[in-house]
């Protein structure tokens, strides 16, 4: 994986963290990794393992596959965008509207007894 791919992954994680309204420290705690390590991931300096990506996906309540794909661990050609990725890609919505939609979606998924971060996103 080249440095650009690391940067893309780190930027994606940072965007998801900000969308979830989590501080760097809080996400690190939820994902059970160190604050400096998460900072290095977000800046594209470190390449996280699949296990770390899984922890981050749970903490961010997003699909692990979306992180694996961004990291180049799986081929994303067959997978369509997740709900949160589709919302994020919609240029007609402003950041606050996107955050509300993602929060509403996650609330509905939880109310159905589903675990965020699985295939449904």
Image (tube, grey):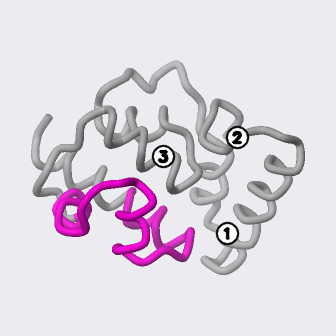
Near mark 2 (Cα within 10 A), the count class, few <14, some 14-19 or many ≥20, is some
Q: Is residue 23 magenta?
A: yes
Judge from the rendering whether residue 95 lies leftward or rightward of residue 54; answer left or right: right
Q: Which residue is mark 2?
A: 115
**73 to 63, vertically: above or below:** above
Percent of width and height locating residue 80: 60, 31
Q: CA distance from mark 1 to mark 2?
A: 21 Å
Left or right: where does residue 80 sit relative to residue 38?
A: right
Quadrant containing the C terminus in the rendered view: top right
| Residue 53 shown left or right of residue 59 in the figure | left
Mark 3 vs mark 2, CA separation in Å:
11 Å
Q: Quadrant of residue 48?
A: top left
- Split into 4 quadrants, where in the image is the N terminus? top left
Query: Which numbered mark, 1 or 3, is in the foreground of this view?
Result: 3
Residue pictured at 44% horizontal, 26% vertical: 76
Instruction: Point out the stretch of residues depicted in magenta.
Output: 13-42
Q: Which mark is residue 57?
A: 3
Disc with the residue nearer the chain's start (1 vs 3): 3
Q: Which residue is mark 1?
A: 98
Drawn side of residue 75 relative to residue 93, left or right: left
Q: Earlier in the sequence, mark 1 or mark 2?
A: 1
Q: Residue at x 29, y 31 (%)?
A: 72
Q: Secondary structure at mark 2?
A: loop
């Amino acid at each position: 994986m080249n440095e650009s791919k690391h940067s893309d992954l780190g930027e994606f994680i940072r965007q998801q963290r900000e969308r979830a309204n989590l501080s760097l420290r809080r996400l690190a705690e939820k994902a059970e990794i160190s604050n400096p390590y998460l900072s290095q991931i977000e800046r594209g300096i470190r390449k996280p393992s699949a296990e770390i990506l899984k922890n981050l996906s749970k903490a961010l309540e997003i699909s692990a596959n979306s992180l694996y794909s961004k990291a180049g661990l799986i081929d994303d050609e067959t997978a369509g965008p997740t709900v949160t990725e589709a919302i994020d890609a919609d240029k007609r919505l402003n950041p606050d509207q996107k955050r509300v939609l993602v929060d509403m979606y996650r609330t509905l998924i939880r109310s159905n007894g589903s675990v965020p971060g699985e295939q449904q996103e």
